[in-house]
Amino acid sequence: MKSLGKISILFLFLVSSLYGGVSASISPRVATIGDMVTYSLKVDGSDATQPSIYQLCGHNIISSGSRTNIEMIGTDYKKTYTYVYQFIAQKSCTIDPVEVDLDGKIVKSNSVKLEVRKQSAQVGQDFLLEYNVSKMDPYVGESITLTLLLKQKQSASLVDSKFLPSDFKGLWKKSESKPSRSEDGEYILTKVKYILTPQREGNITISAAQLRVASRVNSQGWSPTFMPQVQWKSYFSNEITLDVKPLPHDAKLIGDFTLNASVDKTSVNPNEAVNVVVKVEGSGNLEDIESFKPHIDGVNIFDEKSEIQDDILTQKLVFVGDHDFTIKPFELTFFDTKTKELKTIQTQPIDIKVHGSTQKPQQPLTIKKDQQIEEKPFSTQNEATTKTDYLSVALAFIFGVLVGIIVMILKVQKFSTNEKQRFSLKDEKLLLVKLLPYKDGDKEVREIVEILEKNLYSSEKEQVDKVKIKEIVKKYGIS
């Protein structure tokens, strides 16, 4: 009977080893947001494969490990596998059963529940994160200041830390200050300021910022190769929900601005560049200000892309003309955050004098009636003399006309020759002016105009194809 009992016990052990079992557990079962949670799978069997797990109910696995335990029972043994996965608790959930390949068969674990509670800002905590915003109900495009305050207890020990900022969805981050540090009693204070601009109306939520802190813990019997001896804990800031209002009066800009324009010279030679710098200073959505490039008949205008540095927008404009012209006042219309009204500001007009201007005032065309010639009687004794005088006058008139025609032809030829001599392909400013009328309808002309503009009004320099220019000059009869 004793032998039969031993055989029965051995049979049950072999059956247990053959089919085995998988049990899942979690620690702690009730956690606070940011706590490190450990999920364990205990597998009994002779041969098991650790499952590859990257997420558990939406939580990313940040570390994992395994351990094998063999227990001898007389001449027999029992093998137990333990697989451990760690993640940061963020929400309550139920972890579904996990499949494990055990002794050639797929075995499922049990499900486990995790309860996650919100953090409470308690006095004495090692780390505290807090958001504060300058305005809860800004307009679309209005700049606001978001301040992040980190309080760290001076006695807090940490091995490493990682800061995960908010994603600022629906907001444009214009700037971020460098961290400033100070001390307040037992805490070290760190402040970071963000300048944000809402991009749409309605509710916009600034998600919580996260600080992950690593500290050393005792291994409690685990092998150093099994699990790291560093434990991570996360701290979260508060969330902020903005009530963003639409801009009134269909305004596109909002803020408090000043506008001014400066010019390098107001008296130039024909086709000499006049450089104007427009500056907008103040707080607001400077990035939404469009180009100040105006339109002036007979004047070529080139604008550079606006540059924003801190609270100053700068745009450079170049004016090239061959006659006197006036640069009209530059204007800026915006919703004033101080007066809560639509406001328009402008600069003064700028008069440009061009020496030797080709612009000529148009004179009104007047037609005078032929004056009546008073006829006087001639005496018969002077008829022969008068006829002779008429003949002399006629001959002199014909001779004068011939001489005049010859002189005019010679002048035209000389003028044409001088014009050709004055127009040189090396004069890029004059060449640019003469090619501009043809750039819209000719791709080759447009390419050359772009090269000339870069050479004249930027730091870039590029060689111009002289052969192509000569072909274009000949094609359009440019002189």
Image (spheres, grey):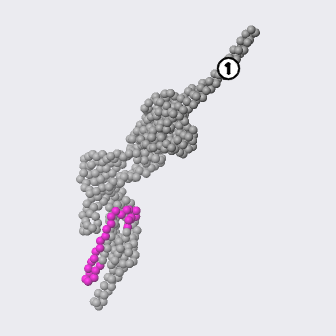
Name the spot of residue 134 as percent of width and height, x first.
Answer: 39, 43
Compared to residue 187, the image places residue 416 above or below, namely above
Name the spot of residue 125 as percent of width and height, x first.
Answer: 28, 54
Q: Secondary structure at mark 1?
A: helix
Furthest residue toward right: 380
Magenta span: predominant SS is strand
Which quarter of the picture shows residue 377? top right
Which quarter of the picture shows residue 55? bottom left
Residue 306 appears in view:
no
Q: Nearer the viewer, residue 394 or 165?
A: 394
At 46% from the left edge and 30% from the top edge, which residue is drawn? Answer: 268
Compared to residue 62, the image places residue 12 above or below, namely below
Residue 61 appears in view:
yes
- Name the kind of residue labelled 1 in the image: Leu
Relative placement, left or right, of 356 versus 20 is right
At 33% from the left edge and 83% from the top edge, which residue is drawn? Answer: 14
Name the spot of residue 312 as percent of width and height, x first.
Answer: 40, 39
Relative placement, left or right, of 13 versus 57 is left
At 49% from the left edge and 29% from the top edge, which residue is drawn? Answer: 354
Furthest residue toward bottom: 1
According to the picture, the residue beneath numbered tag 1 turns out to be 395
Magenta run includes residue 249: no
Name the spot of residue 368 as percent of width and height, x first.
Answer: 67, 20
At 30% from the left edge and 77% from the top edge, which residue is drawn? Answer: 79
Q: Quadrant of the N terminus?
A: bottom left
Label 1 packing within 10 angstroms: few (<14), some (14-19), many (20+): few
Relative placement, left or right, of 119 versus 380 is left
Q: Quadrant of the C terminus?
A: top right
Magenta region: 53-78
